[in-house]
Image (tube, rainbow, N blue to C red):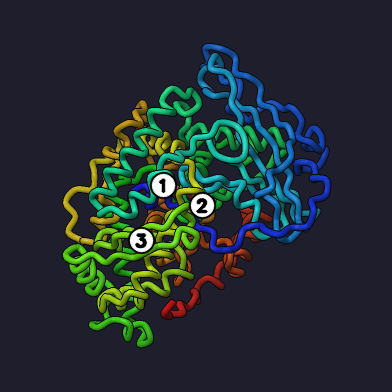
Amino acid sequence: MIARVAATALAVALLASACGADEASDPPPLVTSPPSVGDDATGADASGGTTTGSTSSTAPLPAVSIAQIDCPDDLLRPDGLALACGLVTVPIDRADGADGSTRITVATLAGYDTGFETPLAVLQGGPGGASSDFGAWFPQQPFTQVFIDQRGVGFAGPDFDCPEIIDAMPRILASSYADAAILSDEAYDDCARRLDQDLVLQHTESETHAGDVADTMAALGYDRWVVYGVSYGSTIGLELLRDEPDGVAGVILDGVYPPQLDTDAALVASASRALDVLDEACGAEAVCRQYLADGSVRTTLERVMAELDERPMSVLLGGNRVGLAQDVELLLDGRRAAELIFPLMYQEAWLRYIPAIVGGLDDRDESSARWLAETGVRVLLSSSSANDEGTYFAVQCHDRLPFTDGPGDVDDPFAAAVAAAPLAKLCGEWERDAAPPLANEPVTSDIATLLLSGTFDPITPPSHAASTAETLTNATVVVQDGRGHGIWVGDSCIAQIVQQFVADPARTLDTSCADSGVDVEWARP
């Protein structure tokens, strides 16, 4: 199960989502650029971007259109600001209009500065994450934010969720790591067979996601816009750099997931590196070293994993505490411990507790085991609920599988547990045509690009940004010490840098505030 959760690279939202909002007023219109640019305030039927009307089509492409609908209740914001929501009709296959149209969803949040004309297209990770979910809690910005959903996710249109995995979760958690992998495979295989004949799923990949983004921004009436992509959203951003549709003035890549990666090998390397970085940071602080008998997170965790494989611990999880419909007796063996620890490395708010928890497990402390089980399972379930797995498999098994040779021999026990299931095994029932070789090539572009990374990021480390920037002639790379995966939201320094960039992507950015980094407040939970 961890390989899927890890590879989705979801930027887990630690801020509370909308709740207890006042009675909603009439929704605002879908936000567009000034009337001289857009057709009207509702973003009514409009032709798509440069991807529509391709001369290579064997049948004319259907027109792109957009219609406003009521936002679902779960997108009500606690601050009282109202989103506008819409359905965008796009071609299923931009190479052949004979396949007709499908729909994706979009939500917009107006900026507080009416003079700030350039909007930001916000792209969630996954694959399979809903950008519109961000609309419920992302802070308002001076510029308009346009949250564009991937195919098969969001609040309307095709649904590529796999409820089979949630149904199987109690049995998965109560089983040994090896048996849990079998149960997980069976659940995903059942989902694959259910979605097997879906035509939209067969045309769900990074290239089509990029085309959907360009068509949506054109339909909304924007002739100049900036892209923000986090995690897998950065892959879509890179596809937009490759395609260069009309209107793209700049691209922000936060937690860079470039197309040229060997996905299996990269997961092994990034997991091992993340543990080393955590070990080094903890070793440099006396308050952190005291949690560990030998002062080392790595050696203690490896010992803990071996001991738990020999003598697993059992933790009773209350269903209401972790988000399950029933109580579960979780079996905590060594590989399961790694599975639960790895997602906690994504966010510094959780990461700061890991050394103390590892030290507690070294003493077989039941409260440490309970905290890891409850917190880790909540994060895993949240990640699963926030991602539509069909979209994940459609993209990974088309875009990434042809270009990976598997993880190979892995000496690092932690990395081996994180990357236990190679992509070829995961894609068994999700058969897709292979992406063309171009999909695996580095992106070259002279469009202004801002690349953001956190030093602790366990899935998209700073080295991904560095290698990506080598073929981008107008790139600015920012690495912030002490941060995890997805560093824009929640940090005033990075927010200032992003605002500078959106205002004028061509300017020389002042990134000096990121040089000092963020201190980690090591603690026991």
Residue type marked 3: Leu
Q: Are marks 2 and 1 in contact (CB under 8 Å)?
A: no
The amino acid marked with disc number 2 is: Val
What element does badge 2 sit on?
strand
Q: Residue at x 48, y 49 (%)?
A: 473
Q: Where in the figure is residue 323, as x and y percent of width and height? A: 49, 56
Task: Say left or right for 101 vs 519.
Answer: right
Of all residues, the one furthest to the top in this rendering is 58
Q: Residue at x 58, y 62 (%)?
A: 489
- Which disc number belongs to residue 103? none
The crowd level at tag 3 (other Cα within 10 Å; few <14, some 14-19, many 20+) is many
Type of the residue with mark 1: Pro
Q: Which mark is residue 340?
A: 3
Which of the two discs, 1 and 3, labels the residue nearer the N terminus? 1
Mark 2 or mark 1, whichever is nearer to me: 2
Q: Which mark is residue 258?
A: 1
From the viewer's perspective, is the residue at label 1 or at label 3 nearer?
A: 3
Q: Is residue 423 visible?
A: yes
In front here: 193 or 501? 193
Q: Position of residue 235 (x, y in %)?
A: 46, 44
User: Dot 3 lies on which element?
Assistant: helix
Residue that sits furthest to the front in the current view = 326
Mark sitting earlier along the chain (2/1): 2
> Where residue 51 sits: x, y (%)?
58, 27
Determine which residue is flagged by label 2.
230
Category of crowding for the residue at label 1, using alpha-carbon neighbours closer than 10 angstroms: few (below 14), some (14–19), many (at least 20): many
Query: Which image quadrant is residue 495 in?
Result: bottom right
Judged by depth in the image, the label closer to the viewer, 3 or 2, is: 3
Q: Work out whether mark 3 precedes mark 2 in sequence or the reverse, and give the earlier one.
A: 2
